[in-house]
Image: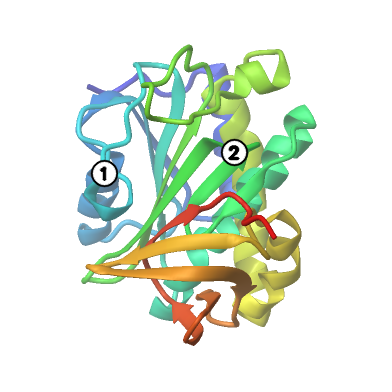
Amino acid sequence: MSRTPGTSSEVAVRRAGEAAFPGFQLRRLARTPSTQDVVREAARAGAREGFCCVAEEQTAGRGRSGRHWLAPPGTALLMSLLLRRRPEVAAAVPVLTGLAVADAVAGLTGVSCRLKWPNDVLAGSAKLAGILAEVEAGGGIILGLGVNLTVSAFPPDVPGASLDRLAGAAYSWDTVLTALLPELGRRLEQVDAGGIRSLRTDWTERAAGLGGPVRAQVGSAIVEGTALGIDDDGALLVETADGRVRLVAGEVHLLPPQDG
């Protein structure tokens, strides 16, 4: 179900989007299975970089490792954005997007966020936003993002954070997206000029869990050790009992500090 375009809230989004991405096009939906799939279809039809889908509700939204992104209707910024970049930029997308979200949130609300490799934006130890980057076989990178805006409650086993409770005020999807799009454009330019290495200092300053114990699941394997940081390709470096391990993918859990 599509929303009628041209509302005042969308005007600011479109201006911000067009400044960052000359081919920006906004498709706003009340309900869709997945914004990723909408943008994928547009990519295959030849859409330019900047095609963006925003939905009030996703019925089959997904995160990494096939998980579902759950949010009551109208309580989160649920979006996907088409990037037309060289394939190697895909590895940088979760890193640069995390930084863009953190900068946009800080600029709007003053709330400081931390980044958990590879794809989570945290407030304290709770998840505020999740990132998904998928490479389309026919060309393009599809950036998916979900940000909790006014989620009143989370399942008992989900440590979630909502922006309204963090900031003490409610922020609409269009306000957050208007702040976010320029930050995404700026970080993409940074990667184009200097690669992932140009993001390392900023990412490290905001990273959660560095210097502490982590457990990572990579397929059926478990890796435990101390998180050291990311390398020039965006991989997480973990010091284990058997030596240094380089993780390019996986589910990472931050562990409590060990005594002694």
In this rendered view, identify the residue nearer to me: 28 or 136.
Answer: 136
Residue 56 in which image quadrant: top left
Color theme of the render:
rainbow
Against 116, residue 139 (above or below) is below
Residue type highlighted by circle 1: Arg
Q: Is residue 15 left or right of residue 248?
A: right
Residue at image coords 59%, 38%: 125
Density class for disc 2 (Cα within 10 Å; few <14, some 14-19, many ≥20) is: some
Q: Earlier in the sequence, mark 1 or mark 2?
A: 1
Q: Nearer the viewer, residue 186 or 33?
A: 33
Quarter residue 134 falls in:
bottom left
Mark 1: few, some, or many residues within 10 Å (few <14, many ≥20)? few
Residue shown at the point (48%, 48%) measured from the top left: 24
Nearest to the observer: residue 32 or residue 50:
32
Q: Name the residue under label 1.
A: 67
Secondary structure category for the residue under label 2:
loop
Q: Which of marks 1 and 2 is in front?
A: 2
In screen coordinates, is 124 left or right of 147? right
Q: State the residue position of label 2.
A: 125
User: What amino acid is found at the position of numbered circle 2 in the picture?
Assistant: Ser
Q: Is residue 12 above or below residue 230?
A: above
